[in-house]
Amino acid sequence: MRAYVFAGGEIYHQYIEERPEEGDLVISADAGYRNATLMGVHTNILIGDFDSLGHIPDDVDEVMQLPPEKDLTDTQVAVDVAIERGADEIVIVGSTAGRLDHALSNLAILEKYWGNRIPMYIVNGQNRVRFIRNSGFIVVRSQYKYFSIIVADEKVKGVSIDGAKYPLVNKTMTRIHQYAVSNEIVKNAALINVKKGGLYIIESRDL
């Protein structure tokens, strides 16, 4: 089952191709309810302390109210609930605009759950973000003009990019020297591999 987690933060909904289908689970994390509503999506489960949303709407199927003082963000709890409900793929909508601390914590969700082998990515219409570790990924040519790889560890080894304007072959990259930004696909797809370490793969467009 695919789950959509709608988080807060600005989205460019007209550019978001990913849309829930029948049988998908839709969870809104607090103000993420507004983003779901903006996209015309019905919320199955609404989760949060509602400090951002300010009220509990009556057109959702289920409400899980959280205390304002807690260890996890509303979005982190929403992802946990999605997994508990049986999700085998998760799309997080929003979460990368607005407060930087929230954006970084939401990016860390991708890294945290990589070991669960549950496909998961974040999309907001301008960016689509994935995380890989000791693995590879094929980035297919799409509406996004650019893609970048951002090192998540102090050092990663064996980084290769094929099918792109700026290829790499078995390079070592460090966190403080991010030199693989604003690449472009020149074929139908680009293949990214990393032998040791973690990378964020970010597809983006100018708006």
Image (spheres, rainbow, N blue to C red):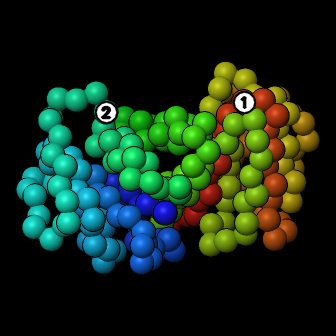
Label 2, secondary structure: give it.
Answer: loop
In whole angstroms, how far apart are the C-alphas of marks 1 and 2?
26 Å
Residue positioned 62% across, 72% down in the render: 143
Q: Earlier in the sequence, mark 1 or mark 2?
A: 2
Residue positioned 47% across, 55% down in the render: 87
**Percent of width and height locating residue 57:** 11, 64
| Residue 72's disc number | 2
**Percent of width and height locating residue 123:** 49, 59
Report the mark closest to the observer, 1 or 2: 2
- Towards the viewer: 12 or 38: 38
Residue positioned 38% across, 64% down in the render: 25
Quarter of the image for residue 92 reads: bottom left
Circle count: 2
Left or right? Give the position of 133 relative to 123.
right
| Residue 197's disc number | 1
Residue positioned 32% across, 42% down in the render: 77
Left or right? Give the position of 24 relative to 55.
right
Q: Amino acid at mark 1?
A: Gly
**Percent of width and height locating residue 90:** 49, 56
Residue 135 visible from this viewpoint: yes
**Percent of width and height locating residue 112:** 52, 35
Question: Relative to 176, is 66 above or below?
Answer: below
Left or right? Give the position of 135 relative to 70.
right
